[in-house]
Image (cartoon, grey):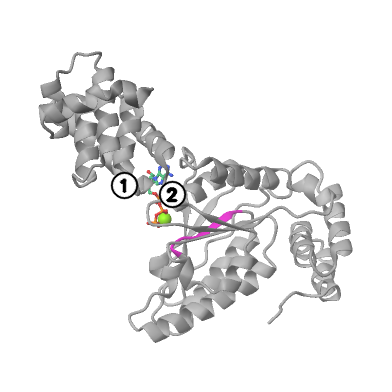
Amino acid sequence: MDRTRETADWLPEIAEAGLSGDLSRLQLVLLSAVRSLRKDAPKVSARLGDLLAQYTTGANPLRWQGESSPPPPTESEEGMSLVRLVRTSGATSPVLAPATRDVVDQFISERREGSSLMKEGFTPPCSLLLTGAPGTGKTMLARWLASELGLPLVVQDLSTSISSLLGKTGFNLRRTLDYARSHPCVLLLDEFDAIAKRRDDATELGELKRIVNVLLKELEEWPLQSVLVAATNHPELLDPAINRRFDLVLNLGTPGDAERAAILANAAGRFAGELPRSVLDACSLFLAGRSGSDIVRIIQSAIRRHLSRKTSLVEAVVHEAIGASGGDSDKRALGALIRAMHKASDGELTVREIASMVGKSASTVQHHLKKKDVANG
Ligand SMILES: Nc1ncnc2c1ncn2[C@@H]1O[C@H](COP(=O)(O)OP(=O)(O)OP(=O)(O)O)[C@@H](O)[C@H]1O
Ligand SMILES: [Mg+2]
């Protein structure tokens, strides 16, 4: 079903906003029209975008902080709020692989340069689908995006949005989307697949279909001033049509060697100075396949161990990293770790001490230390 509206279909809405003198409503309608007409009437869309950019003097229309936010939507039974407003101050970016980082930076630049893009007849991206295993930084990234764009972060509250009544979840979703459309914000539909989770598989799929349909319709006419971010661990459950409607689909995979070491260093915070880079690099080899959130948890328990047991931080981190790898360390990782510890301690750690820290025999440690030159050469 194609819901794209034709040029003439926009006229009544534009006329109403214009004649009633509601300038911000008019801007909103025009922004939606620019977007909706982009494919089928590119010239009209470009001209409207040009006019908008020309008359929205000063403030970037994608950021304008007009009237204060309207009251959040509530569900109809008990009047509970369907969304949460999440603080964005102090948000930090997740550590991302360089190619992913580049895509995210591009998204942010295009949003920031929204006015200049519109002047040239291009529309900035408004919707983003984040996929990836649990704990790979999807929620963290949405929060950071909102803070970078200077927009409030509105997060759909799953506990109030999910209803056991047939069709009600979709209705709640529509109200949440309407709210996000009514003023500039980043709307996060977190754990998007979960809003259709049901005990009975057949209804679950039926409801998911209904909800995806609601979203498909809304994405067509999503206004440029707000950003819609949906996140899911299960992209395979979503209708393939949905991927095409998002301006950008980004998979946050589990972090690679370098990213894991960077997450370890970041998460160590003020303790990072006590952890030589070579040790972090070696420890990260033990954590292959682990998510960012696993790694943060590992370093935090290492710090607690360090503080409560008065062990050195290097020893605590090595202990946790080896423990997390389940003992089946590969030889390359073990060798790198032993050499890193030896080097970092400036020869102060004895073979026996290193052996006890890594849980191996002294002869194994000796064997790996001898390979030093080969490994480095
Ligand atoms: N790439 C990363 N860089 C730095 N920290 C990370 C990264 N990924 C996860 N983390 C850490 O893990 C925590 C949880 O991550 P987050 O909630 O963003 O994951 P998620 O992908 O949304 O997971 P879920 O699918 O379970 O909702 C973050 O607050 C952060 O401390
Ligand atoms: Mg999340």
Question: Which segment did they paint magenta?
Answer: 185-191
Q: Residue 294, percent across and down?
A: 31, 47
Does label 2 point to a residue whose CB lies under 8 Å from ligand 1?
yes
Q: Name the residue under label 2.
A: 137
Is 250 on the left-hand or right-hand side of 256? right
Q: Distance between the residues labelled 2 and 1?
A: 11 Å
Earlier-in-chain disc, 2 versus 1:
2
Q: Residue 354, percent across and down?
A: 16, 25
Q: Quadrant of ligand 2?
A: bottom left
**Is residue 215 something that shows in the picture?**
no
Q: Which mark is residue 294?
A: 1
Is 36 on the left-hand or right-hand side of 164? right
Tell me if mark 2 has few (under 14), some (14-19) or many (20+) residues whose alpha carbon lies within 10 angstroms of its own.
many
Q: Find out whether residue 190 is within the magenta segment.
A: yes
The structure residue drawn at horizontal position 24% and vertical position 17%, both measured from the top left corner, is: 345
Q: Say above or below: 104 vs 344.
A: below
Tell me if mark 1 has few (under 14), some (14-19) or many (20+) residues whose alpha carbon lies within 10 angstroms of its own.
some
Q: Which mark is residue 333?
A: none
Q: Say above or below: 357 vs 329.
A: above
